[in-house]
Amino acid sequence: MMKRLLASILLCVSIVISHGITKSTEHLVYLPEAANMDKTRTAGNTKCRSQSECGYHDGVNYSWCYTDYSDNWDYCCTGECTTEGATFLWCQSGLQAQYCGNTNTKDVNGRKCLETHTCGTHMEDIYSPFADYYWCYVDMNANWGYCCSPFSNCGKHGESYNWCNTSRSSDSNSWDYCNIN
């Protein structure tokens, strides 16, 4: 029987954590990283670069690692990947909730993503133009393509053509035509 990991998010009326941090109703409460989490894969299941395991680097309040290609990075889970309370897979990453589980392996044009760099936000920094978009490298020459958001499958969605949302936000302008088989 598989044991469930301790939940990473608690909705509470008022909890005082042993470190003196108080959170009130409907706020997230941070719990330490689970000891048996895979520290070599991001929340989106991208492989971390060698010598760059998931962790709290550079004083930030979320777990992350550099991915295999370039100096891009992605979030890592600090709790189990679950659908609890949602209709999609998510996990806790420090003080933030992240999409987790398997991501797309093809860009919106149907090109296969590098195995080491599947679709994700892969942020170089939060000010990067890619910070809000799902994308992947499609070859070792740094050619890339937008990917459908994990929350938006390629489909007609009431139109005469296939399209999907490519952004983490609900911005209606962040979509692209798609041809994923």
Image (cartoon, rainbow, N blue to C red):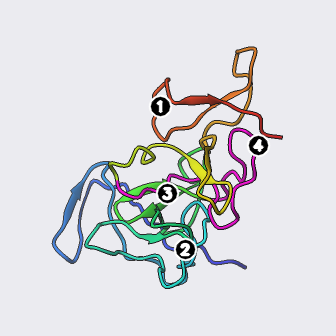
Which mark lies nearer to you, 1 or 3?
3
Instruction: Say left or right for 64 vs 37.
Output: left
Q: Say which quarter of the image contains residue 15.
A: bottom left
Ranked by sequence position, the earlier of labels 2 and 4 is 2
The x, y position of residue 83, in whole percent, is 60, 53
- In the displayed orientation, state which residue is furthest to the left: 20
Q: Dots 1 and 3: beta carbons under 8 Å?
A: no
What mark, if any, has residue 48 been given in the picture? 2
Compare marks 1 and 3 and give the one earlier in the sequence.
Answer: 3
Camera-side mark, 2 or 4: 4
Mark 1 touches mark 2? (CB < 8 Å): no
Secondary element under disc 1, as helix, strand or loop, is loop
Q: Position of residue 66 (x, y in %)?
A: 47, 71
Q: Earlier in the sequence, mark 2 or mark 3?
A: 2
149 on left or right of 26: right
Residue 122, labelled with which disc? 3
Looking at numbered disc 1 in the image, what kind of residue is underneath it? Ser
In the picture of the structure, the residue carrying the numbered disc 4 is 110
**Residue at x-position 69% and y-position 51%:** 104
Relative image position of residue 63 (x, y in whole percent): 40, 69
10 Å crowding of disc 3: few (<14), some (14-19), many (20+): many
SS label for mark 2: loop
Amino acid carrying mark 2 in the image = Cys
Give the quadrant of residue 146: top right
